Image (cartoon, rainbow, N blue to C red):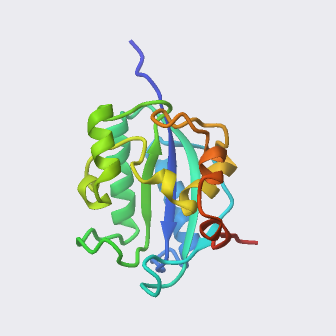
Amino acid sequence: MTQRETVALIALGANRPSEQGAPRETLKAALSLLEARGISVEKTSRWMTSPAWPAGSGPDYINGAARVSTVLSPKSLLDAMHKVEAILGRHRNGDRWAARTCDLDIIACRSMVSPDIATWRYFEAASAEASRENLIVPHPQMHRRAFVLLPLADVEPTWRHPVFGLTVTEMISDLPEEDCIAIAPLP
């Protein structure tokens, strides 16, 4: 019996240098480290800058998105992503808004809703802190974040949110214009 392949959309972000170099180089290294763990990077977005939040909390972020595939389960993929973050100097110290050398998030696994629709709706309404270590997909805050959706549009603009029924492009059009203007592609 063959294992079912997990196809996932992931978000990448960094605003502090690591031993690999500046944030963009660190995120490129993260993609290589994922590949070394048997996670195939099928498509990547352009790199984009976004302001740290809350305003004044740190240097601008470099953000991107990728579509990956693997025989790992979604939970094992998340564990592998956390190991890559740690290799690149990410320390999960509880400070939600701290600057980061590497932040990797599973945004979606096809049309999967996990753990279930009622629990997902709870996490979508609750603070992001509540879902920090759990596998909640699609990412419960993705539809509110231009720094996730704009790079994701480079990778999967027609992916449809399994709860809201909206494509990435439609979710972007629902964002406040000032949120989108603040995100800029890097040369």
The answer to which of 105 and 178 lies nearer the viewer is: 178
Residue 105, visible in the rendered structure: yes
Observer-nearest of 164 and 135: 164
- Residue at 50%, 51% in the rendered image: 143
Q: Is residue 112 left or right of residue 68?
A: left
**Residue drawn at (59%, 58%), measured in percent from left and top?**
175
Q: Residue furthest right?
A: 187
Residue at the outermost top position = 1
Residue at image position (32%, 51%) is: 125
Which residue of the protein is positioned furthest toward the bottom in this rendering? 56
Percent across and percent down for residue 109 are 46, 36
Q: Is residue 137 above or below residue 1?
A: below
The quarter of the image holding the N terminus is top left
Q: Position of residue 176 (x, y in %)?
A: 60, 63
Q: Where does residue 157 sit, x and y in percent of width and height? A: 67, 43
Residue 126, percent from left and from top: 28, 54
Q: Is residue 145 left or right of residue 47?
A: left
Residue 28 visible to an observer of this rendering = no
Q: Residue 96, relative to residue 117: is it above or below?
A: below
Query: In the depicted view, which residue is nearer to us: 174 or 184?
Result: 174
Would residue 130 be found to the left or right of residue 148 on screen? left
Residue 158 appears left or right of 136: right
